[in-house]
Image: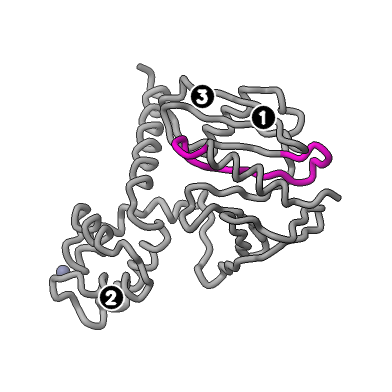
Amino acid sequence: MDKAKHKEMQNQLAEKELVEFKKRLPIDENIFSQLFDFLDVELSQYGCDHTTILTKKFLDKNVVVNAIDVIDWLEDNGGGCDCEVLANVEDLFDYLNLPIKKTYPTNQIKKQKLNGLKTDFGFSIDKIPSPWTLTETILGNSKIYNFQIGKSDSCVAGLACDFPITQLDNDKFWTDLWIRETELSYNLDHLTVERMEFENYFAILVKTKDWTPVKIWCIRKSTEKWFLKMTTELSRHKGDIKELEKLISHIKTE
Ligand SMILES: [Zn+2]
């Protein structure tokens, strides 16, 4: 095997491990960063009494509902007490500081629930049909709009611009996009592309029996200015497509 090929395989392996690592995290990776910052301050003041009392205090303060899972996970990863959490676990999250990843300090992120939305690119909805909720997230100068079903983020439909309309019939484009967005790098032989048509919309669906994520790009026939990009899970996507149809029936025609 030549060197370049070997290097490429190593990169793929590291990428695969990172994907697996992220999948097994009991809470969002960004909450871990906040925990480490908190422990930095508290430990310098109180020291470690060889329990996880400060970690528990943080989880309690931030209303983390699965705190027990987090404590178990930390222990499995070498964080049996507060000082070990910093010494052994923090390094596992070094990837968060890679320059390619844009992270915002939490005080620059603003999130709010909306009851309706009208944008300057012609998207308009007056009422959000249940079980959907609409959230606006402000990150620095950009606004992100996400519809989601229920409280978990298992099914999210984001409002997006610049639909790649010229690629509509190009299956490879859509499977490649699925791969890029899921960051999955192996077991990709069974990816399929389906095209659906709702009343005023076209939709492209990419999934595989080998992985959980299902992606759907849904565009209105009368405009290319915006579209909905939905991510859901294999086991539930059929029900979610019905909900998507309901959601788009509430979007106003201009
Ligand atoms: Zn300790």
Q: How many marks?
A: 3
For this view, does 21 lie left or right of residue 118? left
Q: Label 1 crowding class (10 Å Cα cut-off): few <14, some 14-19, many 20+?
A: few
Amino acid at dot 2: Lys
Q: Residue furthest left?
A: 50
Amino acid at dot 1: Met
Residue at left offset 48%, top offset 39% = 236
> For residue 225, what is the image quadrant?
top right
- Indicate which quadrant contains ligand 1: bottom left
> Which residue has dot 3 on it?
191
Q: Which of 233 and 252 is in front in this view?
A: 252
Measure the alpha-carbon separation of dots 2 and 3.
Answer: 45 Å
Q: Nearer the viewer, residue 81 or 112?
A: 112
- Residue 196 is marked as 1
- Residue 111, horizontal then vertical, whole percent: 58, 67
Q: Nearer the viewer, mark 3 or mark 1?
A: 1
- Which quadrant does the N terminus fall into? top left
Residue at left offset 44%, top offset 56% = 97
Q: Nearer the viewer, residue 112 or 39?
A: 112
Q: Is residue 93 magenta?
A: no
Q: In this view, does 195 lie above or below 217?
A: above
Amino acid at dot 3: Leu
Region in magenta: 219-237
Q: Nearer the viewer, residue 185 or 130?
A: 130
